[in-house]
Amino acid sequence: DPLFGFEPWTVNRGNYLAYRFDKRVEADLDMTHGDQRFAIRTTPGGGDDDDIRLDIAGLNVGPALGLFPSAPPVDGVLGANLTLNLAADSLSLRGGVSVAELTYDKQRFGSVDLGLFYKQDRGHLADARLTLDGAEVLTVQGDCREGRESPLDLTMTVPGFPLQRANVFLPADLLRLSGSLQARVHAGGTPERPKLDGGVRFAGTDVRVPMIGTSFGLSADTIRIAGSRILFDDYAVYAPNKSALTVGGEVSLADFGRMTADLALRASDFQFVDVARKAGTAVYGKAYLDLGATAKGPVDELVVRGNVALLGGTDINYVMQDSPMDVKERPQNVVTFVSFSELDTQTPDDTPQEVRIGGMDVLVNVDISNDVQAAVDLSADGSNRIDLRGGGNLTYTMNPLGDVRLSGKYVLSGGSVRYNPPVISQKIFKITPDSYVEWIGDIADPAFNITAVETVRANVSSDEQDSRPVNFDISINIRNSLNDLAISFGLAAPEDLAMQNQLNSLTAEQRANQAMNLLIYNTYTGPGTTAKVSSENPLNTFIQKELNQWAQNNLKGVDLSFGIDSHGEDDPNGQRTDYSYRLSKNLFNNRVRAVIGGKFSTDADPSQNLKENLIDDISLEYMLTKRDNMYLKVFRHTGYESILEGEITETGVGFVIRKKLSRLGDLFKPMRPKTKKPRK
């Protein structure tokens, strides 16, 4: 009654297992444990060609593999019925192996049955068939005989393997497959240098990338294999917008020890992100790119060169599930207990780290259109959010030693930072144009030069002067690299010369203190001057916050914001309340952008304001080309130019072209260079 795997087994009496020096095996061993059985026997007679029979039934794979460290998380019920015949000059094997309810990491793969036949007699003859849940998914037939022009003659056929079964072996956040794989490959030549011919085909196959939440379709065209070369004849991978990424070239399998590739990838207006916003989604929005890249050389030492362009119309959003802006208790390790006896017994690890010489050589230029929009939701509900708009040119490199470098500048053309502090009302800072993020090598340590401004209107009172309204610009300045980040506050009054001169007389630290006072306490105190932001009605503040929160959570694809501003009797225009709104919508894959805004004031003549100001800002912008940044715009804007001019209404049509120039003369160069005529 031996113990195997901490379980008692029963063996037959007179059991034995012998291996003779003349390579003969004799056995009579039958072990059982409940429904599990392991038996190995040889036929009686003692001849030179005795059959060795192996019978396995009901053997649980999981507990058996659990005895070994670092064993894969595989489980199932193993069964086998194999017969091995050993003769002086031949060998044969026939039978079958099965694993019922095979699982990997507690995910069901299916019931697998493998029937095989192998014979060695002046050559090799093989025949194997694999079934999954009773359906045949793989067959291998052929032989290898010396003396022929092509000793190897082996054919592998895959009538239809369901790719979704392979998902159990893939990380859940890496790939999800669907559809089926069909293949037929013939191997000729010699076992040392086989010659492969045939084809592989994907039927109804979709590849989903959970990290970006987008699915891509694979073409149903056959990928040909000829002369041990996998030929890609503009094989297509389809995006959600039906644009194709084509792969051309070949992969050589002539030497399995050093496979080589010569591939070219091309894509135009390829939508690589298309995810609707849902609860729990980490990335949502749409993103488009143009791609032109090549990959050449040995597979383990590829040389990759290419250009990637993020196109206008890209609007990508990332949601931080664990927001750093949330005010909540964060546990800290206040006390740490250390055993000094354990520290004395610990020795430093002197094992040298493995260094691999050789790898990919990558150089990719990334061109980001000026109209690419990106956003980060600092909270799951979107109340705290950073919106970015801009473009630039970046260069990504990786040398064969694995060193990754990124260089270039991402210039912001606009954006905003919206923050809802627990006590203070909502703050919206607008990012000034020409702010940028720059990389000079280390991809994890960019340099920042970003300025975000919020405008606050306050009533300024000076000595022996009447109060007047002044617009203060409170700025947040982010400078230096990420490892040495410097954040400072500033204050300016660009529309009021007297106030700006007073601010210029203050030191940078004093301006920062005054900016914080305006931001938190709504007050300013300067030399002989005081200012106070008009106290808003708490009910108006609550209604404004709830309306904006409702619009963010319920209106999909529409940007709608409301504003309610109250002005007291000390305002020059009298006591009133201004109600404003702004509605923007992107249409036709972000090619068209419509904006409507207006304001209604409760002054002495509400009907006049309702007539003139309910729609005072309307624009319609059409992007002619995603690549060249050309726009056609129709607009009507109403505003106040000055006290003397009063209300000004601007209506017109505009054409905008954005182009990066090294010098002014480049603006007048033709788009396409003229082709030179060859000389005779």
Image: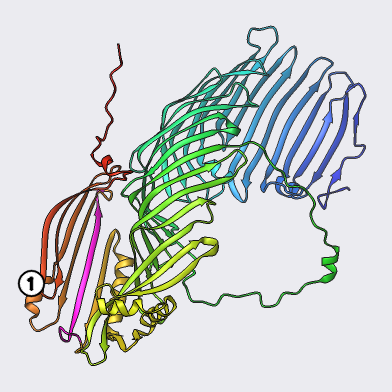
Query: Residue 117 versus residue 588: which sits nearer the camera?
Result: 588
Q: Is residue 274 visible to the viewer in this orientation of the structure? A: no
Would residue 229 be visible to someone looking at this image? yes
Closest to the observer, 430 or 260: 430
Q: Which residues are magenta?
A: 571-588
User: Front-most of 213 and 585?
Assistant: 585
Q: Amino acid at mark 1?
A: Lys
Q: Measuring 61% from the left and 51% from the top, which residue is drawn there?
A: 106
Q: Position of residue 212 (x, y in %)?
A: 45, 50
Q: Quadrant of residue 421?
A: bottom left
Coloration of the structure image: rainbow
Q: Residue at x 41, y 73 (%)?
A: 489
Q: Position of residue 113 (x, y in %)?
A: 63, 34
Is residue 670 covered in magenta?
A: no
Q: Is residue 344 left or right of residue 217?
A: right
Figure check: 549 above or below 249: below
Q: In the image, is 288 to the left or to the right of 641?
A: right
Q: Is residue 587 magenta?
A: yes
Q: Position of residue 103 (x, y in %)?
A: 62, 46
Q: Kindly give the residue lying farthest to the bottom in the view shown.
A: 464
Residue 597, given in percent of the width and then of the height, sits at: 19, 66
> Is most of the magenta stretch helix, strand or loop?
strand
Q: Where the C terminus falls, by quadrant?
A: top left
Q: Is residue 399 above or below residue 444?
A: above
Most foreground residue, 66 or 428 = 428
Badge 1: residue crowd in 10 Å (few <14, some 14–19, many ≥20):
few
Disc count in the image?
1
Residue at (30%, 14%) from the top-left corner? 679
**Residue 240 vertical position relative to residue 479 in the rendered view, above or below:** above
Q: Which residue is mark 1?
A: 611
